[in-house]
Image (tube, rainbow, N blue to C red):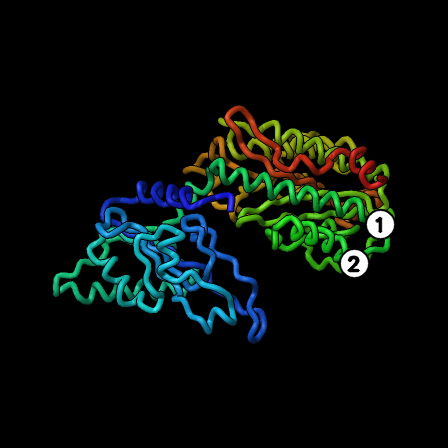
Amino acid sequence: MTIGRQEFARRRARLMALMEPDSIAIIPSARELVRSRDTEYPFRQDSDFYYLSGFVEPMSVMVLVPGREHGEFVMFCRERDAQGELWHGRRLGPEGVCEQLGADDAFPIGDIDEILPGLIEGRERLYYSMGRSAEFDRQVMAWVNRIRAMEASGAVPPGELTDLDHLLHDLRLIKSAGELRVMRRAAQITARAHCRAMRNCRPGLYEYQLEADILHEFAMAGARHPAYPCIVGGGDNGCVLHYIDNSAKLRRGDLVLIDAGCELEGYAADVTRTFPVGGKFNRQQRALYEVVLEAQRAAIDAIRPGNHWDQPHDATVRVITEGLVALGLLKGRVDTLIKKGAYRDFYMHRAGHWLGLDVHDVGDYRVGEEWRLLEPGMVMTVEPGIYVAPDNRRVDPRWRGIGIRIEDNVAVTADGCELLTGDVPREVDEIEALMGA
C-alpha cells in the first residue's frame, strides 16, 4: 500500500488534537450488504473508518479516547476463526489489529457491550456521526442510557453528543502527499482506460462492450473496482446525466459519452470524455464540444489558492452561455441570460465536486455564509457540459440529442493547480487522431 501505518497514526493524532478534553469518538465500520439471498455485494469499507485505520474488514468499531492511560486507539473486531476463514477469507483478529495496525487495545466485537460503556463513562463529550445506521445509532444510545441508569451509583454519562463529521471531514478535505500519489496513479489508470475505449470504439458495438474495455483496463492495472457505476451513453443517452443501462448499440454519426473512474487503495478517479462513435466529429458536435472545452479551460484557470469554490463554476457558466448565444441556441444578452439561468436548459449541474476516498468526497463547500476558499491539497473535478435534449423543440433539429461532458481531476497546489488526468486527450484533433490510429 502507498499509505502506511504511520500516516494512519498521524491522522488519528490530528483528529484527537481537535477533540475537546475528556471526550471519546466512536466510528463503526461499513456493514456487509445482501445482494440476493445468500450472496453479498463486494465489501467496501466506510471511508471515515478506513481513513483513520486502514482496516478493511466488516463488523468492526474504532474508538479514540484522547489521554487514555492504557492507549488512545481501541478497536473491536472479529476474532480469528478457522472455520469462518476457510469459507470467507483470513481475518486479522484482535492480536493482528494491534500488531499490524498499531491499535493500543483490541477486543472481540462480541465483547463490545461489556467493554465500550466503561470507556464512555466519565467522558464529557461523545463524538459520533448520527444518522448513517439506525441500528448502530440505537446501540450507541443504549450504551449511553445504561450509564445514565447508573448515575445514582456515581456513574457519569457524557453531557454532549457531538457530530464527528465536521472535524473529520475537514481533515479529509486536504490531501497529504501520500494521498496525492495514490490519486495520481488512479488518474493514470483511468486515463489509459478511456484511451482504450476510444481506440476500440466503432459503430455496431454495444455500450456495455466499451464498459468492458474500461473495467478490463482498471483490473489489469490493479484497480479491482470502479469508483462508481460506469456511464456509457451513446447518442441521446449522453443527455441522461446518470445513465447506467449501457445496453444500446452505438451508431455511426452519434457521440458516445463515457464517465468512468477507477478506485485504487480506496481513492477515486472521476473522468468523462465524449467522442464520435465513427471517429470524426460533425460540424454541430464539434462546435458544441469546443464550447465545453473552452469552459473547462476557463474553470481550470480559476483554480488556485485564494479563489473561492464557486469561481470555476461561474467561469463555465459565462463561457457556455456565450457559446450557446454565438451558435444560436440561446438568444439575448449574455448577462441577462446568466441572471435568468437560461443556460440551465442545456447545463443543469455544477462544474465539479470534491474528490478523494469518496467520488463525491466530503467537505463543506461553504464556511458560514461564504464560499470556501481553495487551499493546496484540495482535489476536485472540473466537468462542464452541454446537453441538448432530443425533444427540445426550441432549437434546430440538427442540435438535438447531442450530449457532451468533459471531466478532469485537478489538485490545488501552492501556486495554482495540477491536472491529474491530463493523459486523456481532450482536443478534437487529438481524439480523432487517437481513434484513427
Choose between 64 and 83: the one closer to the eye.
83
**Quick check: 193 left or right of 108?**
right
Q: Amino acid at mark 2?
A: Ala
Q: At which x and y percent is residue 7?
A: 42, 42
Which residue is nearer to you in this view: 99 or 69? 99
Q: Which mark is residue 342?
A: none
x 80%, y 38%: residue: 434
Asked whether residue 393 is in view, the answer is no
3 or 412: which is nearer to us?
A: 3
Q: Is residue 331 above or below residue 27?
A: above
Q: CA distance from mark 2 to mark 1?
A: 13 Å
Q: Which numbered tag is attached to residue 248? A: 2
* Count of marks overlaid on the render: 2
**Quadrant assignment, res 270:** top right
- Residue bearing mark 1: 202
Res 421 → quadrant: top right
At horizontal 86% and vertical 55% (from top left) the residue drawn is: 204
In what element is the residue under mark 2? loop
Choose mark 2 or mark 1, whichever is in front: 1
Q: Residue at x 24, y 47 (%)?
A: 67
Image location of residue 72, percent across then percent down: 29, 50
Q: Secondary structure at mark 1?
A: loop
Query: Where is residue 235 shown, x and y percent of the image?
Result: 79, 50
**Foreground pick, 287 / 109:** 109
Instruction: Please identify the quadrant where the C terminus is shown.
Output: top right
Residue plotted at (38% across, 54% down): 129
Mark 1 crowdedness (10 Å alpha carbons): few <14, some 14-19, many ≥20: some
Amino acid type indicated by mark 1 = Arg
Look at the image and tell me whether residue 319 can be seen: yes
Of the numbered discs 2 and 1, the one sitting upstream in the chain is 1
